[in-house]
Image: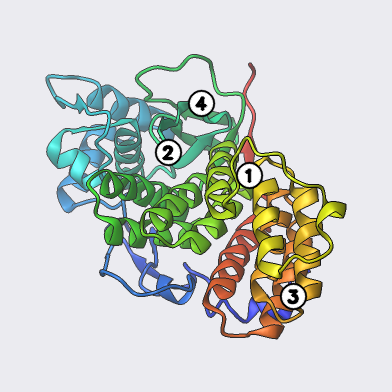
Amino acid sequence: MILVRLSLLMLTVLGTACALSRIEGVAVPATDRWKEVVAGDRAETVSPDYPLDVTPEMVRLARDVAGRGSPSQKLTALRTYLFDPELFPFQYERSGTYTAIEAFDYKRGNCVSFTMLFIALGRAAGVNVQPALWRAVAGREKEEELIVVNNHVVAVYKSAGGVLLYDFAQARDRAPIGLRILEDNWITAMYLNNLGVEDLRQARLARARERLEMAVAMAGDFAMAFNNLGVVYRRQGDHDRALNAYALGINGWGGGSSSMDNIRLLYALESGHDQNERLPLHEDVLRGKTPEAMLRLGHAWMARGRAERALKLYDRAAKLAPVNVQAMLAKARAELYRRRSGAAIKTLSRALSLEPDHPVTMHLAALLKLQLTAAEPAREMIFQPD
């Protein structure tokens, strides 16, 4: 049960209103109200393109190439056309994440771009092709603390006769063992994630922040986007929001380890304690310590992955200073580190009752609400033989 206090923080659910694409009957996820969902400061304005949209030229080509056969025959014809270098000289570009329109016009891009192009053309030809995510996320690329989604997105077509899978990865070390069907807001979030990472590489922090905040607003359980958003916040010097994002990255779909590493490093920095220092146990620090000292010591234990010990110190800090919102925030993040979202909700509700307009608490509550809302519907999975 999601507490009322948290639900009030989400003014609207992104995607409740849709615009139309140039393909009849295909709706485009709305992105114009995403700022109402994520609590944070306004920065630059980003108007994302719908990555699966098409031009009239693409619609004509798709229908000409696909012909009038069955859905599988249409998709086979499209795939043959796209792989013919004489007809469609597409160049693989590892870091090039483009929309379907851009991939069509530029004739280049990575596997995500090519997959989105195939899906868009398939839909233009009248076949309901869907994006899917490979369950094993080994296909992602990690660059230090950043994660780029590259070659574990595939296209699928479901019919009464079974499932057709179209995998355009340049290299795959093993066959997919499980696929998650993606809604279009998820593929849009992946597109925004990759653009946000490129912004980070170029030190365009404000733009990266907007793109990644929009990504998590569109796909609230997208762990990799939460991790990258945490990197943006940290590089902007906003450690509180970085800790929030990393904590949600631990709990999102398809991630965990990167956010766990990053949150430990940030806790070590926040604690002021050396990583090799012998830390006192809870019983050794009950007397004569300030709430701030308790929090720092709790952070030091979090840096070592000892959330249980950290929680005891955060509890002590909260008792010493009952109106200390920072202690409540620390407890909520520790519970999320332990993947106990229910306990985190209760703690956040207590923090909001103490200080309803506390910006960092509202930020964490809003992000957690996004994640819980995204996780509520059962996500369709397709399993393939190993």
Do the CB atoms of the residues marked 3 and 1 lie less than 8 Å apart? no
Q: Is residue 376 left or right of residue 243?
A: right
Q: Which residue is mark 3?
A: 3
Q: Which residue is mark 2?
A: 147
Question: Can you tell which of label 3 and label 2 is closer to the viewer?
Answer: 2
> N-terminal of the two: label 2 or label 4?
4
Task: State which quadrant residue 150 falls in.
Answer: top left
Identity, as a three-letter code, of the amino acid under mark 2: Ile
Give the CA separation, mark 3 to mark 1: 30 Å
Please, is residue 270 above or below residue 277 in the view? below
Please, is residue 35 above or below residue 142 in the view? below
Q: Which residue is mark 1?
A: 303
> N-terminal of the two: label 3 or label 1?
3
Give the CA separation, mark 4 to mark 1: 26 Å
Identity, as a three-letter code, of the amino acid under mark 4: Ala
Q: Which residue is mark 4?
A: 138
- Which of the pair 298/93 is nearer the observer? 298
Q: Residues within 10 Å of mark 2 (few under 14, many from 20)?
A: many
- Which of the pair 274/122 is nearer the observer? 274
Question: Can you tell which of label 1 and label 2 is closer to the viewer?
Answer: 1
Do the CB atoms of the residues marked 1 and 2 lie less than 8 Å apart? no
Specify the color scheme: rainbow
